[in-house]
Amino acid sequence: MREGIAQAIKRADYAAPAYWIRSVELTFDLDPARTIVASRMRVERNASGNGGALRLHGEDIEPLRVLANGQSVSFRVEGRELVIDNPPEGDFTLEIRNTCAPEKNTHLSGLYTSGGGFFTQCEAEGFRRITYFLDRPDVMAVYTVTLRANKARYPVLLSNGNLVEQGELDNGRHYAKWHDPFPKPSYLFALVAADLVAREQHVRTRSGKDHLLQVWVRRGDLDKTEHAMNSLIASVVWDEARFRLPLDLERFMIVAVGDFNMGAMENKGLNIFNTKYVLANAATATDSDFADIESVVGHEYFHNWTGNRITCRDWFQLSLKEGLTVFRDQEFSMDMAGSASARAVKRILDVRTLRERQFPEDAGTMAHPVRPDEYVAIDNFYTATVYEKGAEVVRMMQTLVGREGFAKGMALYFERHDGRAVTCDDFAQSIADANPGSELARTLPHFKRWYGRAGTPHLTARGRYDAPTRTYTLALEQHTPATPGQAEKLPFVIPVAMGLLTRDGRPMALRLEDEPADKAAEERVLVLDEARAFYTFVDVDSEPVPSLLRHFSAPVRLHDGLSDDELLVLLAHDPDPFNRWEAGQRTALHRLLAAVRDGQPLQLDAAFVEAMRGVLRHETLDPAFKDLTLTPPTETYVAEQLDHVDPQRIHAAREAMVLQLARDLRADWEWAWETHQVGGAYSPDAVQAGRRALANPALQMLCLDATARGDVLWQGKAYQRFKDASNMTDRQGALWALLASHSEMADPALQRFHDQFRDDALVIDKWFILQAAAPEKDGRVFARAKALLKHPDFTLANPNRARSLIRTLCGENPAAFHRTDAAGYVFWAERVIELDAINPQLASRVARALDRWATLAEPYRSAAREAIARVAARAELSDDVREVVTRALE
Ligand code: ARG
Ligand code: ZN
């Protein structure tokens, strides 16, 4: 189907391997220029296969010798495979010796060096860059690993499992031997050899077993590990309490590394993390950094069961572990947040991410199902669809079987599949089988379309009230637009959590016709499993306002046709905080879209401004919730509602909206700023963080308004706050207020910030991000970003640094990126090409910034297409980037 992409791998072609590798002993002589790897494998023929040649994966490595049962055996290297045409009969021992060059490994996949140490990243296909192997997740082996290295330079030698032996060698070298008793796929292998120190904690779990927890970092970073350790302990406790899943290891290690392609990696017993998701203290990390660390530490820890104990049969099943584990980390963060409103804030943030990243993906050139059908580069499929939409699919299952039922389903899943490599079908089947009679069990075959079909369903709702019969009939209808390769869409199973409110905002009892009177609840879940269905509610005394898709019960686009007045009822009264927030967003969105469509300057009406004032001044609402409600939808989200996107118009409309909210609510922002200050010692907890989440935007609004009026008072206050802040959240908040209001004090503040934090890489990343994310004005932000490429602190070799400037500009600042002179696209093409020569995974992420080029209005559309075509025309491109640009042009 996809010509132009020759080597697509297809899900339908899955076949079990012809051979198994049951155990492997690895010995590493670690040297940055030339590491020698000796591997000794126990190989078995797959009884159900027909033997034949043994083909091992290998990439960018050199074979030295191959022995089978101790005898040399003939082999050949064919592309990215080492082929042994005539392996011995029966089971045999295979010994391979090969070399690799960690210091030349700029892909950061396989074994590489960072900050003078050795680290690995094997998921998805990095192990084959270390040694020859059956590098596929259904081949699971027991690993014994010996590391040998110079002791002074690499005093710490770590691998998976338990340390069984260590000692001295000649020439200043030493060794350590590790054994992991759990059979695992090669993508979960890890090693670390570096000069590191650990924060340690012993914990005793419910079962009475003792465990050692360690967080390894560079010397000097120990004072930034407390939060990661606390998050790890909380994760251990939570998984045991919520799912009865205990820590199964004597030792659990987290290691932080400064050069890392992704967030973190769940290698068995030896999680390796991007420093960004480990290191934090009040002076260097913001509240959201603290929250991210908690959720990523949780995520990787939860993988120990969902991913490691039960893994994926093949990479098409990636969401089996990722969607489920994202769901688990979301639930963990919600439980940690505490109050109902803090939970709702977390849910809103997660839905925002889904709609801003996954919805565009599902509507763009890279659209794919949660369980993809084909890929060229598997690393391109670590996507918002597989992760975040996958988590929504799991969440819908929980909605359909209930929280208890879901826990029962998880228990059955482990009972059936522990220790094995399985599929998304196996998971769904377990949850359904544990809950016979549930809506999931009833609809399972159709429900599973969520795994197989791409695209975001549109859900249309129309209500009709009939006063004489006191009935209210709700018609629900679904439709899903075509996606690449999937023209026709069958109906999905859509759980619609809903309630009805009176016009003055009181919840109504919900009873469907034919139901007994005792069935009346104020919220219920309608399960739409056909193209359309009608639901008639009885005993409805007055015309209701429907509140549909509460807590975003399904990943769909809802069109309920509610009027502004009805939305204002929900904004003021909906008992579901998610829909309350959503109602506010929709009233703002209507106004933004109207302004963008008719190109008129945006002018807010009093009703809207008063509603926003009501939220801001509300007596009981959570301050973080207020901030979310008063923040208009992002430019990206607005763009997603349009077929012809003019990013500059959208920017102008949104800027005008923000400015008017700053002006009309000036006294209210002052009140918010003054009453939400936090005294005492810094803590990232939801209460303190919530206050800062409102105080900092208030300062920004006050600066914006004052600066627009030529008044420097608030800029002065912001600069003062910037200088005196006792924590990074407030310092960055004040700096952002200066940047976002285009204050003349922004430059001196940036200079000072750089001077103060020049030695802290993660803070310097923020320094780049803030400048690349600043609201565009007269092309200045773009010009600055271009100039920053030449800054001595900038480098493409470090993924965090590269992302902080390039991804921020191209992916998160539409008005700076989409320029009528196409300079943004030229910048994009140059960076994609430069990065691709160093790190294809990273290049390919940047390449995706133009996924949605086809919906751009002219002149953007043609210029974007031309830029993509220019990249695609290069002869030398990685599979990763080639796949993205080829699909973009199809
Ligand atoms: N399994 C890791 C996580 O989500 C991510 C690994 C990503 N690897 C990759 N090559 N894209 O926790
Ligand atoms: Zn994961």
Image (cartoon, rainbow, N blue to C red):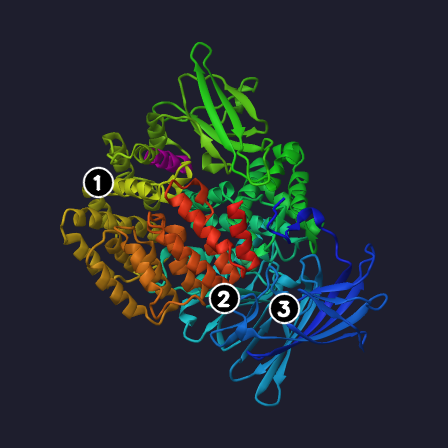
Q: Residue 446: name its quadrant.
A: top right
User: Residue at image x 48%, y 42%?
Assistant: 359
Dots 2 and 1: beta carbons under 8 Å? no
| Amino acid identity at mark 3 | Gly
Question: Which circle's residue, 1 or 3, is located before the other in the chain?
Answer: 3
Q: Residue furthest top?
A: 468
> Where's residue 305, x and y in %?
61, 55
Describe the element under mark 1 as helix, strand or loop.
loop
Query: In whole angstroms, how far apart are the C-alphas of marks 2 and 1?
Result: 49 Å
Residue named by callout 1: 665
The magenta span reads 577-589
Residue 613 in the image: state x and y as whole percent: 25, 37
- Disc nearest the viewer among 1 and 3: 1
Observer-nearest of 565 and 796: 796
Relative height, residue 342 to residue 526 (above, below): below
Q: Amino acid at mark 1?
A: Leu
Give the labeled residue for mark 2: 838
Q: Identify the residue at the far right of this view.
A: 89
Look at the image and tell me in which quarter the N terminus lies.
top right
**Is 580 included in the stretch rendered in magenta?**
yes
**Height in image: 316 above or below 79?**
above
Q: Tell me the chief SS of the magenta region.
A: helix
- C-alpha gap between disc 1 and disc 3: 58 Å
Q: Of callouts 2 and 3, which one flags the residue occurring earlier in the amino acid sequence?
A: 3
**Residue 801 visible in the current orientation:** yes
Mark-to-mark CA distance, 2 and 3: 32 Å
Residue at image mark 3: 161
